[in-house]
Amino acid sequence: MRALRILLIVVVILGGLFVIADRVAVNFAEGEAADRLKTTENLSATPDVSIKGFPFLTQVVGGSLDDIEVGIKNYDAAAGNGAQKIRIDDLQADMQGVEFSGDYSSATATSATGTATIAYDELLKTAKSEPTQVAPGVTANVVGLSDGGNGKIKVTVEATVLGTKLPEPVSVLSSVTVIDGDTVRVKADGLPKFGGVQIAESRVRSITDFQQKIDGLPGGIQLDKVQAAPGGVEITVEGSNVRLAG
């Protein structure tokens, strides 16, 4: 009985040491991964990296990690024209089946899903915010974007008719969708009227409807779905063979 008791104590101690070593190793790996991701994606701040699953060390021996969560507070994505940037807020990505090279210089996830937010003031940069002629004597421009409820965006437009600005801006509810995996499109469900003036639909839509291309999300992930929310446009992202580093 005494020998069995000693054996059990040794097993418990070794098990505890293994857990401690495993947690130390995973904390170190998370820090290294965060630093490498910051460099690879040219981020202004170090992202949050959390390696899930236990034990970590046996996953490393197998050359693959089950699940890694990555959080980036602010990410400046290319806006499609090479010069402009659009800020993506609070990008959270869940990487599944992460395999890495023998020297740990590169890592690729089999699949990835995630969420992020585009603030309305960021998306407003895409809309026609400068007065544009939509009919003889009539100019209009988008002055605000906000949550319209039920997943819609409220697009607020200011208009000037024959040199006189309308006393109140007009607004229209718009649907927001993803096209081609890299573009957010805003399209009015109906058409606003400017002081009773009849204006061709195509001219009105040249103001109310717009789209924003978003290139270069981390690791090559793409836009999947999008909807309006109180804090901005919420997007979901997805990808396969997503490069984490290297």
Image: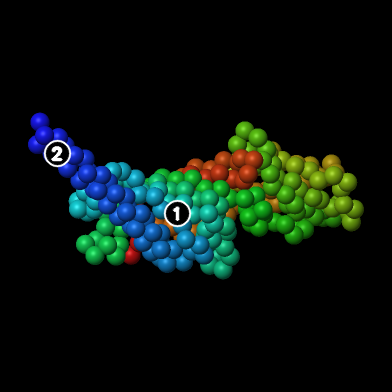
Q: Which structural element holds mark 2?
A: helix
- For the residues marked 2 and 1, what is the alpha-carbon distance in whole angstroms? 42 Å
**Foreground residue among 162 and 198:** 162
Left/right placement of residue 91 relative to residue 59 reads right
Q: Residues within 10 Å of mark 2 (few under 14, many from 20)?
A: few
Which residue, given by chain and number where applicable, does mark 2 sit on?
6
Q: Amino acid at mark 1?
A: Asp
Q: Which structural element holds mark 1?
A: strand
Image spot of residue 73 (x, y percent): 53, 54
User: What residue sits 72% from the left and 49% below the top?
Assistant: 144
Q: Quadrant of the N terminus?
A: top left
User: What residue sits 52% from the left and 65% below the top?
Assistant: 44
User: What residue sits 25% from the left and 44% below the top?
Assistant: 16
In the rendered view, would you say 91 is above or below 1? below
User: What residue sits 20% from the left and 53% below the top?
Assistant: 61
**Foreground residue among 39 and 79:** 39
Left/right placement of residue 227 relative to residue 52 reads right
Q: Amino acid at mark 2?
A: Ile
Quarter-wise, where is residue 12 in the image?
A: top left
Image spot of residue 159 (x, y percent): 81, 51
- The residue sitting at the front extreme is 2
Q: Nearer the viewer, mark 2 or mark 1?
A: 2
Q: Residues within 10 Å of mark 1 (few under 14, many from 20)?
A: some
Q: Along the polypeptide, which appears first: circle 2 or circle 1?
A: 2
Which residue, given by chain and number where applicable, does mark 1 sit on?
48
Q: Quadrant of the C terminus?
A: bottom left
Kindly tell me whether residue 55 is visible in this rendering. Answer: no
Left/right placement of residue 93 relative to residue 4 reads right
